[in-house]
Amino acid sequence: MTDFPSSAAGTELETARSGELRRVAIDPLSRVEGHGKVTLLLDDEGRVQQARLHIVEFRGFEKFIQGRPYWEVPVMVQRLCGICPVSHHLAAAKACDMIVGATTLTPAAEKLRRLMHYGQILQSHALHFFHLSSPDLLFGFDSDAGRRNIVGLAAAHPELARRGVLLRKVGQEVIRMTSGKRVHGTGAIPGGVNRNLSAVERQELRGMLPDAIRWSREAVQLVRELFEQNLPLYREFATFEANTLSLVRADGAMDLYHGDLRARDATGGMLLDGADYAEYWEHILEEVKPWSYMKFPFLRRIGPEHGWYRVGPLSRVTSCDFIPTPLAEFERRAFVEFDDGCAAHATLGFHWARMIEMLHAAEVIAELVEDDDVSGTELVVRGTRAQRGVGVIEAPRGTLIHHYRVDENDMVVRANLIVSTTHNNQSMNIAIREVARRYLDGRTLTEGLLNHIEVAVRAFDPCLSCATHALGQMPLAIELLAADGSLVDRLLRH
Amino acid sequence: MIRAPVLVLAVGNPSRGDDALGPLLAERLEQAALGGVEVLVDFQLQVEHALDLEGRATVIFVDAGTGIAPPYSWLEIQPVEDYTHTSHALSPGAVLATCLRCSGHPLPAARVLCVRGDSFELGAPLSAAANRHLELAWPALREACVTAAAGGR
């Protein structure tokens, strides 16, 4: 059986030769989530030929995991990322389920994990929309950067900012109750979970959910109104055609915790369906390029040049056949029908899709809180021990794959992680390229260009990883380099 | 619910070298179990931490940092509208500003204990220098907490 496939040869997707190109470097996005840098490669006519988003912090993930006993891994992997530790926790736990032979979890364990996961979706999407993206969308991409933040939002739209904080708090309370702690929780273990929800905890959550659902519905409407008010911009900004990839339930429903792999082409045609993620390498390969630490995943049957794809809310909402909660399904239908489907292909459609998922998450949490299984006491199962485990989950930013091989002493000897931001690698490069082609003016880097690139990248909500955030290391800079490497222009934000 | 008047909010990733300084100091503080002092630890500061500030007299942020003289510095902070919109994390000043804007409560007295760190690689242990800084910062943090809990600053 094939396992831990080697990466494909480093075929360049772009045709231009680097020797003929000038480079524009935007560096770094932020130390907080890793060193991010954007390089724009220009051809002789000054046209943007390529965009390259460099993210270095994903190196070392596998090494960090190797050599540890598998049962420690669901806890340890939370330290890979301070932004979505719960997603790593659950993906690792699912991989470890396979290792301990837990082919089917108890209803209590499955539902408690789902509750934890949808809590993570709720809090992550709330943070992204209310505090990272809505300032861009409400104030305009070219507005003062000092205003386009949570504090500026709170000054201009205090109720919106407050809702964002409180929605995030609801999600975090779900995580705290299901994982045992606000951070570094231990709720999911190989074969199940180690705690259930008490009646008091369920009652506490029950009281929070009506507001969470109402505010989520209103957030969906807000994004729709933004599309309606700025249709030409929203339809065209950083828009490009892409394949999609996500998990879906066996009946085609959206399922962010578990399912089979489905891929569609840009027209919605099915490229892959019902594929067992336990052998994901039969369907997905990763390409290596000399200029990036990040790999470039692609659909095996199509190849690296055209087989790249997009993951995350936009792909999930457009790829599933339906959403299995009523309010979110109503909004999904409105989304895909809007302006002949323009939002479903627009990069800014991510925001709309993300809010539909947030509404879905709030509905799922409300359903699960009323389900007595979450107070069940059968929490762990075991089966025939295996030496390989694969766990896949739809994290807030997209498909997350954890793959481990363990030895007879229970130590992890190999690991492969494909995180959401890696899946979106090529899509983000193309989104940046499209923005740069439109907004780069000659050889001068402008705040306007930086703003627009940030807006495009932010739509994907990339996790530039790492959870380290030492004070004093948060610059944002753009550099324009000539073909000979000399500095033409530089723009720096502290 | 009555909240402890003093909140120590320590941030950092225990598995990223010197970024563990904040969590390690928080661990010592929890073991010391000082009256009137609550300790919270997180990977990084976020908007919901603004809610943790409500009803406090004093908040002390504890974090590893670069660009300061070793072994540590006390930094006075005010609510600030900064540029952290490019990130999933907030600065301490932005957390104060968020609290001010969103909660309507009076802000607690706030300052940052910034302990000098240099190495932040995934899987790396605390560096020898950071270990020394930790030992020097601990009594200062403890004393500050005791003073604040007694009603001083």
Image (spheres, grey):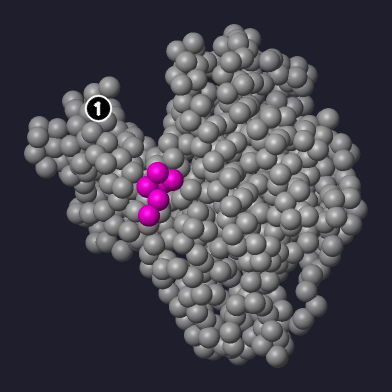
At 21% across and 49% down in the image, what residue appears?
A: B111
Badge 1 amino acid: Arg
Examine the structure image and report whether residue B110 is included in the region drawn in magenta. Answer: no
SS at circle 1: loop
Q: In terms of image quadrants, where is residue A234?
A: bottom right
Q: Residue at x 67, y 72 (%)?
A: A433
Q: Is residue B136 above or below residue A365?
A: below
Does residue A3 appear left or right of residue A406 in this picture?
Answer: right
The location of residue A400, given as percent across then percent down, is 68, 43
Instruction: Please tell me which residue lies in front, A135 or A397.
Output: A135
Residue lying at 10% horizontally and 32% vertically, measured from the top left? B150
Q: Which residues are magenta?
A: A156-161
User: Which residue lies at the image location 36% right of the left edge and 40% below the top edge?
Assistant: B49
**Chain letter of the residue beneath label 1 in the structure image:** B
A389 relative to B110, above or below:
above
User: Quick check: A275 above or below B31?
Assistant: below
Task: Give how far across and how far down residue B25 sits, in percent.
Answer: 30, 39
Main secondary structure of the magenta stretch: helix
List x then y, in percent, for residue B27: 32, 33
Residue A388 is situated, as x and y percent measured from the top left of the image, at 76, 33
Q: Nearer the viewer, residue A388 or A181?
A: A181
Foreground residue, A190 or A109? A109
Q: Which residue is mark 1?
A: B3
As drawn, the residue found furthest toward the top would be A377
Left/right of residue B56 with respect to residue A409 in the rendered view: left
